Amino acid sequence: MKKVNITEGPIWKNMLAYFWALLLGAFFQQFYNTIDAVIVGRTVSSDALGAVGGSSAMVVSLFLGFFLGLSSGATVVISQFYGAGRQKDVERSVHTSIAIALFGGAIITVIGYAIAPWIISAMKTPLEQSAASTLYLRIYFLGMIPNLVYNMGAGILRAVGDSKRPLIILVISCFVNIFLDVLFVIVLGMGKRGDSYGVMGVAIATILCQLLSAVIVVVMLSKSQDMHKLYIRRIKLDMQMFVKIIRIGLPAGFQTTMYTLSNILIQAAINGFGNDTAAAWAAYGKIDVIFWMTVSSLGTSVTTFSGQNYGAGRYDRVRKSARQAFIIAAAITIPLSIIMYFNGTILLKIFVTNDTVITIGDQMIRFLAPFYITYVGVEIFSGTLRGMGDALLPMLITLSGICILRVTWILFAFPHHQTIEMVEASYPITWITTSILFLIYYMIYTKKKRIR
């Protein structure tokens, strides 16, 4: 399948082609998660929705986010070697990356399964949702190895400019997931047997689809005729490549983990307002994800573009990639924010029927959607810097500007005025602060590296 030409040709055109495939992939990734939420929210209960989309979703993001941050190190390393045409190094990094996914998946499975009850309790999850949330988490963690293998394999394909085949895998997985959700929850009647059984049905459907995705991506890599071809027998940890990947990926993984931990603190504060607010936050999260998958896809795009061009010595295209990614981000984010602001109630009704939950969720959308544009700088600047191999300082900036500031807000400001608005305010405050910090550091870094 034809790959996007990253080191030659018009950047905006090639970036859009690469980005749209990523965005569609993210859409289908979220779509089958959303189908889980729609089915349990409308056919089981709002508490079941809270179990799937509330505390448990935050915990999944915590573990999966760390690994995806870690795997971004592999994507950067592979993209730089691929841009420079270093075939042997590409081969070594590919096989080391898959080994990391296998070992990492096994470790996360054991840890996640063991601590699921404790972490759900620590997050002050409403009693009505805690048992189902724990069950969902434990089943989800059982499918962590194929989950990580797919994500690493998809990252390898994207690193060499192929964003279309990961999309094809997700489309297949999405429709299989819809079929299995309907089969387990509705046709086999698991949803009628209570919240836990309904949640179990969607969880099993999810991990089966993750297994399918992993098998397909491994087959695709094994049949590749390019330098990133995968040989099953060669999968092992090459320590030199492992160190290169960890040097870039570990700060990114830690950054993602701290970001998620701060969001878990937010979730705990939201849970303190009761079932309706927790359900509203979960439903809002399913709408809010439209923005996050868009800006995340742009971040991944600019990481790959800056990585390959940096590896090829095309430094002028690195800076141009960042600029044009900003233009694309603004052109999408501003209209999206407006649409969400004025259509919140309609969007929320997709997930829930409870009027109180819808009213609370609409307030959340109207408060936060206008500030989405202030986060764009975080994703674009950090993605560009990571593509050039700089991960430590972006991690520290995110840690300071988002994580520490957000935790400080919730621990010290929120107790003096305990309203939903005070919780929500932690987001725009930290987005604006971190974007400014990234802008300053990006200008210093590019000047130091003489990237014009």
Image: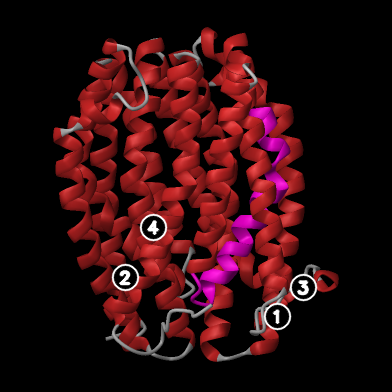
Q: Amino acid at mark 2?
A: Leu
**Magenta region, main secondary structure:** helix
Q: Which residue is mark 3?
A: 238
In this figure, which colouring scheme has been used for the structure? Answer: secondary structure
Image mark for residue 23: 4
**Identity of the residue drawn at 47% across and 90% down:** 312
Residue 194 can be seen, yes or no:
no
**Identity of the residue drawn at 40% across and 56% down:** 24
**Relative image position of residue 252 (x, y in whole percent):** 51, 57
Disc 1: CA contacts within 10 A as few (<14), some (14-19) or many (>=20): many
Q: CA distance from mark 1 to mark 3?
A: 11 Å
The quarter of the image holding the N terminus is bottom right
Q: Which residue is mark 1?
A: 91
Label 3 vs 4, first from the N-terminus: 4
Label 2 vs 4, first from the N-terminus: 2
User: Is mark 3 in CB contact (under 8 Å) with mark 4?
Assistant: no
Q: How many numbered circles does the render carry?
A: 4
As for residue 138 lying within the magenta part, the answer is: yes
Q: Nearer the viewer, mark 1 or mark 3?
A: 1
Q: Which residue is mark 2?
A: 16
> From the viewer's perspective, is residue 302 above or below residue 2?
above
> From the viewer's perspective, is residue 24 above or below residue 353?
below
Q: Amino acid at mark 1?
A: Glu
Label 1 vs 3, first from the N-terminus: 1
Q: CA distance from mark 2 to mark 4?
A: 10 Å
Q: Is residue 73 left or right of residue 295?
A: right
Element at label 1: helix
Disc 3: CA contacts within 10 A as few (<14), some (14-19) or many (>=20): some
Q: CA distance from mark 1 to mark 4?
A: 27 Å
Element at label 4: helix
Label 2 vs 3, first from the N-terminus: 2
